Image (cartoon, helix red, strand yellow):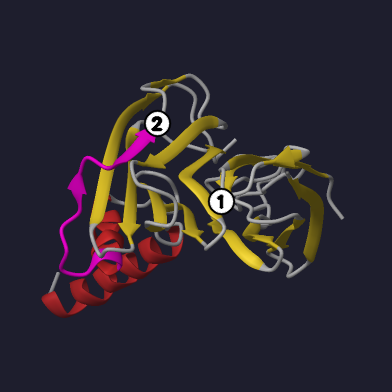
Amino acid sequence: MVRVLLNVPKRVRAGEPFEVKLLISHPMESGQRRDTVGKAIPREIINHLVCTLDGEEVLRMDLFPAIAANPFLAFSAVAARSGTMALTFTDDLGVTQTETAAISVE
Amino acid sequence: MTGERAMPRRRVLLTAAAIALPPAAAVATPAQVTRLIHDLCGEAVPREGKVKLDLPLLVENGNTVAMTVSVDAPPGAVDSIHVFAEANPLPEVARFQFGPRAGSPRVSTRIRLATSQTVTAIAKLRDGTVWRDDVDLLVTLAACIE
């Protein structure tokens, strides 16, 4: 489990784009670094993220080691009705984690 | 010294050199990025204009560089955005695919840059057109290695 901050507005207007901000506490080990004895540190990054709103896809992301540690992502979404925003990400070890936030449309 | 004896020795040296060298220097090349863009766009040639890649021109710390890529198009018109860095250990930076619930076609994140280079963003629109934007930037402190 890693710490995730998923920030969405409490209330949004139907059909109007709103900002989704995401911060994940993750080292995003690039696999390029070496430790103090010169041994390569194995790559361990979050390589895939999917953001959905009530099961409908908002954004699907493939990340590479060129994404900085503690990845921050900001993007835009549109809601038609109140629902749940779910963010699912997978790391190199195949571990999947999901984070949700309620979206209420006025 | 005869030729028959010189050849095996040369071969021995070559073999030794091959073992001593690190396995294929791990740096992407502009040619690799060109190939990836070709794989992505096929025969279509990406034009400049609609996609905008926002990056600082002078990067003081390559470990974390704020990047925003946006497309001048209505929500739903953009299929995907792809970002490449030609001199990073890996040429790919990120891929973003927009779904039916996507709002404005814009994504911000923070990236790593290994050295001064050109970063390229490619946007594929649903109408079949492809667009590109390149940013030539200077990196004073490199990332990825330390």
Q: Is residue B44 on the magenta stretch? A: yes
What is the chain identity of the residue bearing mark 2?
A: B
> In the image, residue B23 lies at what x, y percent?
45, 62
Residue of label 2: B54
Q: How crowded is mark 1: few (under 14 residues within 10 Å), some or many (20 or more)?
A: many
Where B105 sits versus B63, above or below? below
B17 vs B113: above or below: below
Quarter of image, res B52: top left
Tell which tag, 1 or 2, sits nearer the viewer: 2
Quadrant into which the C terminus of chain A falls: top right
Label 1: element kind? loop
Q: Is residue B9 left or right of residue A56?
A: left
Q: Which residue lies furthest to the bottom in this view?
A: B4
Question: x%, y% of residue B35?
Answer: 25, 63
Please give the residue where the numbered disc 1 appears in the rendered image: A65
Nearer to us in this view, A18 or B131: A18
Residue B69, given in percent of the width and then of the height, sits at 42, 40
Tell me what residue is drawn at x 32 percent, y 65 percent.
B13
For image coordinates 76% across by 49% down, the residue present is A103
Left/right placement of residue A26 relative to residue B81 reads: right
Give the residues drawn in magenta, as a range.
Answer: B40-53
Q: Position of residue B75 (x, y in %)?
A: 44, 51
